[in-house]
Amino acid sequence: MFRPLELFIGLRYTRAKRRNHFISFISMVSMLGIALGVTALITVISVMNGFEGELRARILGMVSHATVAGVGDGLQNWEAALKTAKAQTHVVGAAPYIEREAMLQGGRVSGAILRGVEPTLEREVSEIADRIVEGSWDALQPGEYGIVLGRELAIWAGAELGGDVLVYAPQVRATPAGVLPQMRRFKVVGIFEAGMQEYDRGMAIIHVRDAAKLFRMGDKVTGVRLKLDDLFMAKRVSADLADTLGGFYRVRDWTREHANFFRAVQTEKTVMFIILSLIVTVAAFNLVSSLVMLVTDKQGDIAILRTLGLSPRSVMGVFVVQGTIIGLVGIVLGSVGGVLLAENVTNVMRFLESMLGFELMPADMYYISDLPSDLRWDDVTTIIGMALALCLIATLYPAWRAARTHPVEALRYE
């Protein structure tokens, strides 16, 4: 009934009242430290996952998952490329586009990236039509020379809905009056807000046919933008499409276009994981100190068990069990607290704002005014495994020290 004996004695030591209350206090501090570290790790990693997902969604809501372009100046036979791309597995949308740098003049002058799109097909590859906050996306009609501006770009250029802006292309044309820049007057028919500084401040949208006339591209376009049903398949789909189209086309995916940005986010996530793991490590060191003091306090008990035939290995097992139980309770408490906090971090932030009387992340200063959280169970499993491994390592030295106890020396003064 007492098998395994190490587990039975370890559980008895855990439940027994200590003669030295300071040891109990240190054990409680170790347990709470482990719980705090696990809670912080799960919450912070979940919030960073949420931020990464939010940024990815906002970026890929404006750019494409993959792009097919020509190897020269523009893509000539883009209809065939679009048809071939849409026939690929995982491709759910394709749309042509023209993209060039231009200068806009309203009340003030501002540079911008000018993108020509086919409004109907553009809905298949981006969310920009859903980001319109003023005006109408459907007002982009060929030959009408309408333009949709990012909110901050409209402010910087001094343009308003219904007003006009002059668009200067990086080209010149010869006239009887001399060489003049290629320009066209556009009417502001919409203003969008993507929630990303790069696009709200520096992008303007026009119809692809108007862009072709402005930049004198004829029937050519810059390329074809693609949307996939699974954005993480972009690299594989791009490679397959490049093999299918041949050498006259250049296929790129979002993992290449924004590789440095997402690599930086991943690096930051890894560094935060390492830094916050130190909390669990410190708690594990507290566990070492509490177990060492416990071993000293239990010298007489250990000696009696040794004289009754308990092996040094079993003595080690007793204290490994006790240290593991302390660590496991802290890990369970921390995991439950971390999961609950990660799932309700936005509500917690709102509660703190109501208590403090001001917004922690005001919408007029931050594009992401909430704390997005993406709880991933593989991260939770990794954190639990790491914490459990640290607790097991922390028990080894005290358990080894207990196993080296000599019964005669321990009982000499008893």
Image (spheres, rainbow, N blue to C red):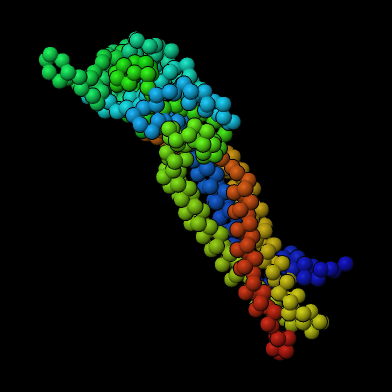
- Determine the image quadrant of residue 145: top left
Residue 264 vs 97, above or below: the answer is below
- In the picture, which quadrant includes the N terminus? bottom right
Q: Nearer the viewer, residue 145 or 154?
A: 145
Q: Residue furthest front?
A: 247
Give left or right: position of 223 versus 338: left
Q: Position of residue 217 (x, y in %)?
A: 32, 21
Q: Position of residue 136 (x, y in %)?
A: 41, 14
Q: Nearer the viewer, residue 260 or 345?
A: 260
Q: Residue furthest left?
A: 177
Residue 72 vs 399, above or below: the answer is above
Residue 264 visible here: yes
Residue 333 vs 130, above or below: the answer is below
Q: Position of residue 280 (x, y in %)?
A: 56, 59
Residue visible at 42% across and 15% down in the picture: 137
Q: Position of residue 257 (x, y in %)?
A: 42, 38
Give left or right: position of 127 versus 163: right
Give left or right: position of 295 versus 227: right
Give left or right: position of 152 versus 394: left
Residue visible at 79% across and 84% down in the picture: 307
Q: Nearer the viewer, residue 337 or 173?
A: 173
- Determine the image quadrant of residue 142: top left
